[in-house]
Amino acid sequence: MPQSAKKTLDHAPLFCEPEYRQMLAKKKLKFECPHPDQVVSDQREFTKTWEYREKNLARQALVVNPAKACQPLGAVFAAAGFERTMSFVHGSQGCVAYYRSHLSRHFKEPSSVVSSSMTEDAAVFGGLKNMVDGLANTYKLYSPKMIAVSTTCMAEVIGDDLHGFIENAKSEGSVPRDFDVPFAHTPAFVGSHVDGYDSMVKGVLENFWKDAARKEATASINIIPGFDGFCVGNNRELKRLLDLMQVTYLFIQDASDQFDTPSDGKFRMYDGGTSINDVKAALNAEWTLSLQYYNTRKTLDYCRDVGQAATSFHYPLGVEATDEFLMVISEISSREIPEAIRLERGRLIDAMADSQAWLYGKKYAIYGDPDFVYAMARFIMETGGEPTHCLATNGTSAWEDEMKELLASSPFGKNAQVWPGKDLWALRSLLFTEPVDLLIGNSYGKYLERDTGTPLVRLMFPIFDRHHHHRFPLMGYQGGLRLLTAILDKIFDNLDRETMHAGVTDYSYDLTR
């Protein structure tokens, strides 16, 4: 075999070695009962046609590779944004391993989550004992200041009552009676990770605000980031802008430090996050702003119910969206937007103008969460590009209407199509029948890139196959520069690949562009 102490190969080149090629070919022939190569080839070509596209888009009973995750993942991410908070998922170990691995693989940081380890007996008799023992172990082993409880499919199908279970666990001494255990029911078989995020943030606020007296602090602002794989870069960039404006603000659910701990010889199971005292004081804020509306619908309603003014954005990136965010902040706080920020805006516009010749008329397919797709389509149109396909598996009919209104506001959106509820297999048909120049989304788009030849720009959670993208902002004017550079790099890299063959395609293998 090709592996030895002196020649250790990664799995990709290893499986290309003759021994493995022969072994895999025998396995396919003996165990997979393959169809003849011509039949497979003919079927593959059929799936690229308009006829197949119509069948594919008409699908209702089957989902293939949806561009979303399940509710508990959003709840786990939300819990990570609070001070010394351990996320406790009432369900099976396998489900919880998925949430941990998803976050760890994206952020390249440990993601600590506890499972109640429900098995078959709990599915029959209920998971109360698992909750009692699990909360006790979590409290003793990990010394949290708060335990945030969410659920998986199993607990929801059998109807476990989290509030009742937590009260029983406290009565049995699993945690002290006054210990904070906020909870959220997050059934994984409905909604998506944005709904789980919303439910958990609302659950935390309810835990501290319910029955508390509110004393309004004028011009104070709560900011809820939403589920954001780029929270490390985005939250820090927005704090920088708000500090320049000298605004009184508080980030509710700030996971930027938790998912960007330093390597200095000290292990940090918990780092950063919104402190419990700050969460309590946040009740008194005059305003609560959400950076992603579809991530925080229930939470914003609750904030209004307690007497706060509330408004939301759709992931403020690019020129106009950042303008709107800062102008709202300025109006609420009565603070002027300083000259330093105005200069940043001008530099972004200058950079867009410098590259206009390469950006104008480019066609894009964008997929991801509803707020992100809205923001990216808006930015693309600012650059003179056309957001031809806008797809959100967890997009609603209300999101579809908002998208159509946005696209109708620009001549660059007149030919755009909006696809709520569709998955990446549907997007494959769209890319074959109505090709675009660039694809924007997460790492799962690499299979579409390989299949359809559409270059992928990775700008959405999760990003598994590239490192450290999340450390740099997408929001704000600086984030706009980062976005612009990522898109241009992909355009130029693709152009280089198409013109690199000496004497064949290299007539304009330009050094300067």
Image (cartoon, grey):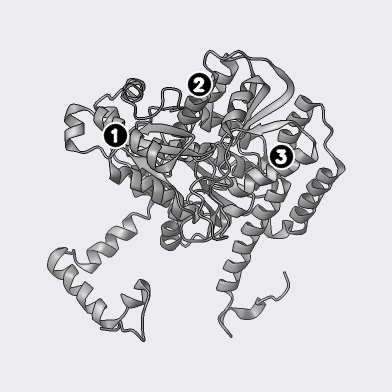
Q: Amino acid at mark 2?
A: Glu
Earlier in the chain: of badge 2 and badge 1, it is 1
In this rendering, position of residue 56 left or right of residue 143: left
Q: Residues within 10 Å of mark 2 (few under 14, many from 20)?
A: many
Q: Position of residue 107 (x, y in %)?
A: 51, 53
Judge depth for marks 3 and 2 and give the one in front: 2
Looking at the image, residue 478 sits to the left or right of residue 107; the answer is right
Point out which mark residue 133 bears: 1
Q: Residue at x 28, y 58 (%)?
A: 43
The residue sitting at 69% across, 27% down in the picture is 221
Question: Reading the chain from its start, which is encountered first: label 1 or label 3?
Answer: 1
Disc on res. 266: none
The residue that disc 2 covers is 206
Q: Amino acid at mark 1?
A: Asp
Where is residue 228? Give x, y as percent.
54, 43
**x, y percentage for residue 131?**
30, 31
Task: Quadrant for the C terminus, please.
Answer: bottom right
Q: CA distance from mark 2 to mark 1?
A: 25 Å
Mark 3 lies on a secondary structure that is helix
Which mark's residue is nearer the viewer, 1 or 3?
1
